[in-house]
């Protein structure tokens, strides 16, 4: 499998790994929506020092997103209801992707939409773009047809993947699951049945904050998504469940995501069954967090007596 990274062949050391056959310098991935169109994060460090960087979710048409407030810090994390604000597919390809491509890091193109056709249009365009070896389907968007989310119903997810999968001839497909479901294993199974090459767990947890003086919701949309340390233990539990119940036997790698700010958080995900670890909200606190996590993770892998981090995936006793 070829990637856009000129260094792909030279990755070595205890953290060198791969995701769905795509070689990565290490298992750390900057999460969708927390590093803009990728270039924004490049001011903080050389992005080739982490495994991959995910774009914010791109929709077929441009979207303004929700009115303020759409991000709000709370103890233990952050509430957000950005509403998929993005420049749309056409401007992403012409204005944003070239700048990201020049950085030489491994890119993951995040795809969102409000209809099956939206997803298909973006997926087709991303598949034609060699600098995107991986795409990630953000299925936590309300489907305008019935108001439900693709990521909250196995049948809706299967229908979506049934249309998107055939359009991806070259690109590996990650499906990012929503934690706002009763049975995360059923959703993972639907994603794998639908042809997912890998799973990302989790998106934000449905949540709400209230301004008690005004007696109004803090976020303009009313409810939003919770991220950051507060969701980490939920994400670890879901990665563990999905790994044990379905991903391990199917040979489907998991990207553990949610509340990682230290190497210990990342190590928990790996022991629970994640091949890679996403970092989102922590980038707003310190955009260099992935470098500190990588240093700590490497020392931990050595202390555990493993030659490579992949030996510790699912290593929970
Ligand atoms: C401000 C903000 C914007 C986000 N935008 C997206 C997005 O565009 N697409 C997506 O799939 N997830 C998006 N997410 C979710 C994150 O990628 C991640 O799944 C979630 O925040 C949990 O990880 P964390 O606790 O490390 O942030 C966003 C999260 C935040 C905080």
Image (spheres, rainbow, N blue to C red):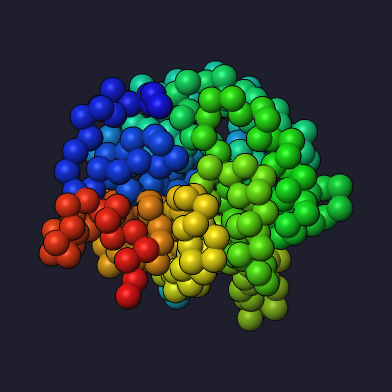
User: For the point 74% across and 35% down, which residue is it?
Assistant: 163
Quarter of the image with the N terminus in it:
top left
Residue at 46 percent of width and 53 percent of height: 254
Counting from the top left corner in percent of width and height, residue 284 is at 39, 54
In-front residue for pair 261/75: 261
State the residue at coordinates (40%, 57%). 274
- Which image quarter holds the C terminus? bottom left
Q: Within the image, what quadrant is residue 21 found in?
A: top left
Residue found at the far bottom of this picture: 212
The answer to whether residue 266 is seen in the rendering is no
What percent of the width, then of the height, locates residue 32?
50, 46
Q: Residue at x 39, y 24 (%)?
A: 2
The answer to whether 40 appears left or right of 193 in the picture is left
Q: Residue most toward the right?
A: 146
Q: Quadrant of residue 152?
A: bottom right
State left or right for residue 59 relative to residue 12: right
Up-down: is 50 above or below 296?
Answer: above
Name the one closer to the observer, 22 or 30.
Answer: 22
Residue 207: x %, y % from top left? 62, 70
Counting from the top left corner in percent of width and height, residue 47 is at 30, 37
> Residue 54 vs residue 295: left or right?
right
């Amino acid at each position: 499998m070829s990637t856009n990274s000129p260094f792909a062949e030279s990755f070595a050391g205890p953290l060198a790994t791969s995701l769905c056959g795509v070689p990565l310098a290490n298992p750390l991935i900057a999460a969708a929506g927390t590093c803009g169109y990728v270039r924004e994060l490049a001011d903080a460090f050389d992005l080739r020092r982490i495994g991959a960087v995910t774009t914010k979710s791109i929709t077929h048409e441009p979207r303004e997103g929700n009115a303020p407030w759409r991000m709000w810090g709370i103890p233990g994390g952050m509430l957000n209801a950005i509403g998929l604000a993005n420049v749309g597919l056409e401007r992403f390809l012409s204005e944003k992707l070239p700048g990201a491509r020049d950085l030489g890091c491994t890119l993951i193109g995040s795809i969102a939409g409000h209809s099956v056709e939206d997803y298909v249009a973006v997926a087709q365009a991303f598949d034609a773009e060699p600098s995107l070896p991986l795409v990630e389907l953000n299925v936590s968007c309300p489907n305008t047809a019935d108001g439900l989310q693709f990521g909250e119903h196995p049948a809706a997810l299967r229908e979506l993947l049934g249309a998107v999968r055939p359009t991806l001839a070259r690109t590996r497909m990650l499906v990012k699951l929503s934690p706002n479901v009763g049975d995360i294993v059923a959703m993972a199974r639907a994603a794998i049945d639908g042809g997912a090459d890998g799973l990302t767990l989790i998106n934000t947890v449905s949540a709400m904050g209230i301004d008690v003086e005004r007696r109004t919701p803090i976020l303009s949309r009313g409810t939003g998504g919770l991220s950051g340390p507060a969701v980490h233990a939920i994400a670890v539990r879901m990665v563990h469940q999905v790994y044990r119940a379905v991903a391990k036997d199917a040979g489907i790698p998991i990207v553990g995501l949610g509340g990682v700010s230290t190497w210990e958080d990342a190590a928990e995900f790996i022991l629970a069954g994640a091949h890679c670890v996403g970092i989102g909200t922590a980038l707003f606190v310190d955009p260099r967090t992935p470098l500190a996590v990588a240093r700590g993770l490497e020392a931990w892998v050595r202390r555990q007596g493993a030659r490579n981090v992949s030996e510790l995936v699912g290593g929970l006793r």
